[in-house]
C-alpha cells in the first residue's frame, strides 16, 4: 500500500486542526478562569462598598 501526497497532506491538515483545537480549548479555559476571578473580585468589592456605605450611614445618623 502506498500513500500519495494528497493523503499525506490530509494527515498533516488533520494534525494541525487537532493541535489548533487543543490550543483553542486551552485559551478558552484560561479566559473562563480569568472571568471567574474578575467576578469574584467584583463581588468582594461590592460587598466592601455595601459595608462602607452602611458604616457611613451609621456615622452620619449619630452625628445628626
Image (spheres, rainbow, N blue to C red):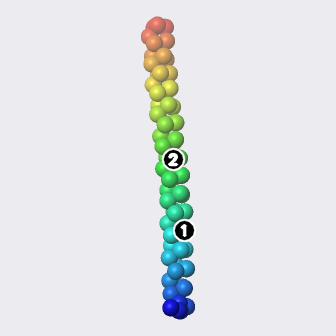
- Residue depicted at 50% across the width and 26% down the height: 48
Q: CA distance from mark 2 to mark 1?
A: 21 Å
Q: 54 or 2, which lies in front?
A: 2
Residue 52 spot, x, y in % from top left: 50, 21
Residue 43 spot, x, y in % from top left: 46, 34
- Residue depicted at 50% across the width and 66% down the height: 21
Q: Quadrant of residue 9?
A: bottom right
- Residue depicted at 54% across the width and 57% down the height: 27
Q: Which mark is residue 29?
A: none
Locate the C terminus and report the quarter of the image it occupies. Answer: top left
For disc 2, the neighbor class at 10 Å (few under 14, some 14 to 19, many from 20) is few
Query: In the displayed structure, would residue 28 be above or below residue 62?
Result: below
Question: Which of the two marks, 2 or 1, is nearer to us in this view?
Answer: 1
- Residue depicted at 51% across the width and 31% down the height: 45
Look at the numbered disc 2 and give the secondary structure of its residue. Answer: helix
Residue carrying label 1 = 19
Query: In the displayed structure, would residue 3 be above or below residue 33?
Result: below
Q: Which mark is residue 33?
A: 2
Residue 60 shows in the view:
no
Residue 36 spot, x, y in % from top left: 48, 43
Amino acid at each position: 500500500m502506498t500513500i500519495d501526497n494528497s493523503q499525506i497532506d490530509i494527515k498533516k491538515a488533520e494534525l494541525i486542526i487537532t493541535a489548533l483545537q487543543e490550543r483553542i480549548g486551552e485559551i478558552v479555559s484560561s479566559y473562563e478562569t480569568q472571568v471567574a476571578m474578575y467576578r469574584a473580585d467584583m463581588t468582594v468589592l461590592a460587598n466592601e462598598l455595601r459595608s462602607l456605605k452602611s458604616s457611613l450611614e451609621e456615622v452620619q445618623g449619630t452625628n445628626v
